Image (cartoon, rainbow, N blue to C red):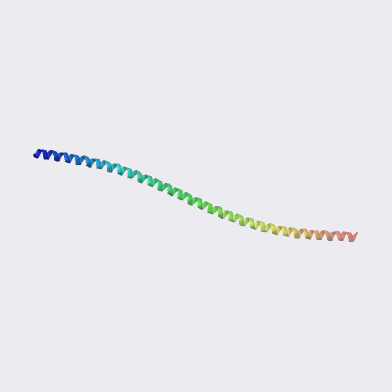
């Protein structure tokens, strides 16, 4: 009877040992899967950081372009103002030349 119990105990220990090994294998596979998931999450995080960085650079570029366009618009306004001033001076000069021409013509007529 003792040898039967010893055989049953030996079989039970072997069965527990096999189940423990299967459990270790399952845990190892789960650990491998979780490691892969962590790697992929890390890759996604890095990609998101790169995209965020690119978006920040793009936003900075848009800001620079906006500032440049504002400067160009201000420069164009100044040119427009100066063109109006030049046109007024040209008109005054033309009027003065017209008056001088009339005066010269009257002087020539009076001398003739």
The residue located at (72%, 59%) in the rendering is 88
As drawn, 61 above or below 5:
below
**Farthest right residue in view:** 112
Q: Is residue 99 left or right of residue 25?
A: right
Quadrant containing the N terminus is: top left
The residue located at (81%, 60%) in the rendering is 100
As drawn, 60 above or below 4:
below
The residue located at (21%, 39%) in the rendering is 18
Q: Nearer the viewer, residue 105 or 33?
A: 33
Locate residue 97, reporting x and y percent: 79, 59
Q: Which picture quadrant has residue 17? A: top left
Q: Nearer the viewer, residue 13 or 46?
A: 13
Locate residue 7, reporting x and y percent: 13, 38
**Farthest left residue in view:** 1
Q: Nearer the viewer, residue 53 or 75?
A: 53
Quadrant containing the C terminus is: bottom right
Q: Is residue 29 left or right of residue 85?
A: left
Total label count?
0
As drawn, 90 above or below 38:
below
Locate residue 73, reporting x and y percent: 61, 55
Q: Is residue 38 left or right of residue 7?
A: right
The residue located at (57%, 54%) in the rendering is 68
Q: Is residue 89 left or right of residue 46?
A: right
């Amino acid at each position: 009877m003792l040898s039967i119990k010893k055989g049953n105990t030996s079989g039970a220990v072997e069965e527990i040992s096999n189940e423990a090994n299967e459990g270790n294998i399952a845990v190892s596979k789960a650990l491998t899967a979780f490691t892969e998931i962590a790697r992929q999450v890390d890759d996604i995080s890095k990609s998101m950081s790169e995209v965020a960085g690119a978006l920040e650079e793009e936003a900075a570029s848009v800001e620079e372009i906006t500032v440049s366009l504002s400067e160009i618009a201000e420069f164009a306004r100044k040119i427009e103002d100066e063109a109006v001033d030049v046109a007024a001076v040209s008109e005054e000069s033309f009027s003065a030349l017209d008056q001088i021409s009339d005066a010269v013509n009257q002087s020539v007529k009076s001398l003739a």
